[in-house]
Image: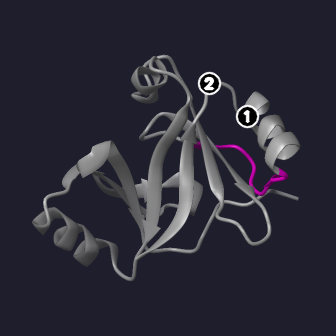
Amino acid sequence: MVIDHIGIAVRSLDVAVHYWEDVFGYHQATELVTNSRQKVDVIFMEKDHSLPVKLISPSCDDSPLCRFLARGEGLHHLCFRCGDLASTLTELSAKGLRTTVPPEPGEAFDDEPIAFLFARMGLNVEIIDTMKRAKKKG
């Protein structure tokens, strides 16, 4: 497994995009994508020779992300890309990680399956086995 991206929870994607552009020199790499299952809006930011950053914001008032943001904005998850999502999920579960979201289509990944687990040290982990991302249109 390798780290694919870092997920950052934000209240406003517009504000966060500008901040990451101005402060860290990233650029917006995708259009906004709404993940209807997780009730979040997503934009990927990229910079040469750096890990991508996925900015996530609640898409509605009953998004589970609202509870997280009640404590403040910040690191939400690390995403690891693996060779096979199902076998990696089984392996990590056997090592004590708890599945919080079983495999389901991820709209930000062109509906390729994603899963979330909770690890020790309070770490929320996303697992994917794809390089696909929903890109900018046009």
Rendered view: 88 above or below 10: below
Rendered view: 103 above or below 56: below
Q: Tell me, yes or no, if residue 110 can be seen here.
A: no
> What predominant SS class does the magenta segment belong to?
loop
Rendered view: 124 above or below 88: above
Who's the residue at 73% across and 34% down the image? 16
Who's the residue at 18% across and 73% down the image? 91
Q: Is residue 102 magenta?
A: no
Rendered view: 128 above or below 116: below
Q: Position of residue 50 (x, y in %)?
A: 70, 66
Q: Position of residue 49 (x, y in %)?
A: 75, 72
Q: Secondary structure at mark 2?
A: loop
The residues tagged by marks 1 and 2 sit, at their Cα atoms, a distance apart of 8 Å
Mark 1, other Cα within 10 Å: few <14 / some 14–19 / many ≥20: some
Q: Amino acid at mark 1?
A: Ala
Q: Is residue 46 left or right of residue 22?
A: left
> Could you say which disc has been placed on residue 115 in the image?
none
Who's the residue at 37% across and 54% down the image? 125
Q: Is residue 16 left or right of residue 122?
A: right
Residues shaded magenta: 25-34
Q: Which of the pair 51/136 is nearer the observer?
A: 51
Q: Tell me, yes or no, if residue 132 can be seen here.
A: yes
The quadrant of the picture occupied by the C terminus is bottom right
Q: Amino acid at mark 2?
A: Arg
Q: Position of residue 70 (x, y in %)?
A: 46, 17
Q: Secondary structure at mark 1?
A: helix
Mark 2, other Cα within 10 Å: few <14 / some 14–19 / many ≥20: some
Q: Which of the pair 73/45 is nearer the observer?
A: 73
The residue that disc 2 covers is 11
> Could you say which disc has been placed on residue 16 in the image?
1
Point out the tag, 1 or 2, that comes first from the N-terminus: 2
